[in-house]
Image (cartoon, helix red, strand yellow):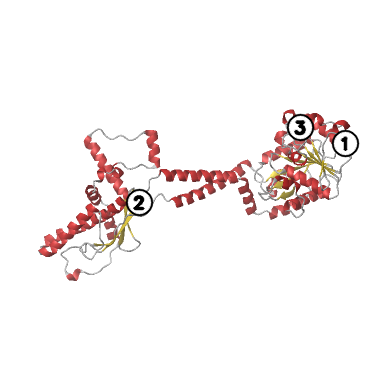
Amino acid sequence: MNQRMAWPDAGGTRVQSLVDQHSDGQTFGILLRRGGSIILAFLAASLFLAALYIANAPSIFVATTQVLYDPRQQGAAQSERDYVQYTIDTAQLESQIQVLKSEDISKTVIEAHALAKDPEFARPVPSLLGRFKARIFGPSELSADPADAAMLADAITAASFDQSYDVRRVGQSYVLLVTFRSLDPEKAARLANAVTAAYVARQLTSKVFNAERAGFLKAPLYDLNKELEGARDAIKTGVLQPGAFPSANVQILNTARIPLGRAAPQVSLIFAFSTALGLLLGTAAVIGWQRLNRCLVTPGQAQQALGLSCLGELPAWARWTPGRQKLRAGNSSIPYVQKVNNIRASLEFGGLPDTHTQCIGILSARRREGRSLLAAHLARTFAANGETTLLIDGDLQNATLTREFTPTLIMKQDDFSVDDTARSRYSTYRDVSGFVFLPMTAHPQTTSNSSFGRGLRGLLDVERANYQRIIIDFPPLSALPDSWEVFSVLDTAVVVILAGSTPQTEVERVIDSCRLARTAIAGVVMNSR
């Protein structure tokens, strides 16, 4: 008679050691391996969006001029003794920055270069968000009144021009940096110089006015007017020379040159950011998915959530190891084989209901959780330990072990009878380690779980007298609608859990099926594949 136990708790002390040895880094590594496809999907989506943005974003070029504000000369009427260096406060420099950004400077440059007719300023290219809004709501309509339309066009040109350049102070110095952005590199340099020239012309205009009021002689006035004319020409041409206007309150340190490369979009920076964002979002999605589905990752989680002992944790094979080599590997120095030996020891010294337990079922909630591989190696370790062992492939729809050990065998469901004539048609395989393999595979379209359960029970009644250990590789629970009837032939069961992939709810359904069949569970095995 089969021996039954409800919930054995053997191996609890060894499980605690497994829990203590499992670091957070290993847990995180398991999650990353399980969610590799999710992370790659987020990374690919992020890089695709980055490439889409780069392909649609216009190229922006930036040109820069540097001017030094020199407050020594506040008017042409100053005498020689007034030319002294003194410290200016931040407010004075801020006022000069506002002068550079004033409407007077902008209007002067716009008129000099006829920017009202330039499509870049008169009809600026909208942003990606602006294009999206235009597709949904349609383009904005201008007023029908010609006067209003002209005013609106001037306002759009002025706003576009003001957004294209910037003025800022360099650190705590008196140097002002004038930058201009444009879709055309030559235009960026020309307009940056023109803005600076307009600022210089404003300074010189003030000096000429003060000199005329002070009654300066003609020679100084002639020099000032000559510099003023040169500044006005520079506004029109966009060409400046450093030190060309000594009478102004500013010194031109550097003039704008045609930029050699675009300033935006910065391809390397965008791809680096999108890569980091994709990896971050992918990792967050994997962790969120794991928490949402309550996937079991560590032996400690399995023990606490399921109330079962963890018999062991299987290491991952190298990715390039073929399946045939995994199934037939018998070298005890291989980490996987060593772990299976430990699991066999845990079963024999506390994991089995009693020493006479013969039929052990290897169960899982899903496919590709390492169930068949564990069953083959567990049979091999039992046989190597001197116990007569029978390995049965009970997966009717995906006979992994049958394809490996007896690939030419094709059997019908009717072969699951116990008479000698039918049994003579069984093709068995004897492994070098000593275990015997018995395939019990049928075509998927003729599979009947109830008849399979009855045939398997009859077969086990005969084979229990011939073997000390019988290991059955069962299909996943989803392929066994009447799993309680099939599981009832077992003395005990081992549940395989793919760490970081199998939801806790699905494992609990396997356990409930065993409870309904009154089959004891020796424990769970965490597979880190």
Residue 328, label in figure: none
Coordinates of residue 322 in the picture (x, y in percent) = 69, 46
The residue identified by callout 2 is 61
Residue 205 in view in this figure: no
Q: CA distance from mark 3 to mark 2?
A: 71 Å
Q: The N terminus is located in which quarter?
A: top right
Residue 84 in view in this figure: yes
Q: CA distance from mark 1 to mark 3?
A: 21 Å
**Foreground residue among 257 and 121:** 257
Residue 442, label in figure: 3
Q: Closer to the camera: disc 2 or disc 1? A: 2
The residue identified by callout 1 is 462
Q: Are marks 2 and 1 in contact (CB under 8 Å)?
A: no
Q: Can you name the residue that lies furthest to the front here? A: 408
The image quarter containing residue 370 is top right
Coordinates of residue 514 in the picture (x, y in percent) = 76, 37
What amino acid is found at the position of numbered circle 2 in the picture? Phe
Q: Residue at x 23, y 58 (%)?
A: 200
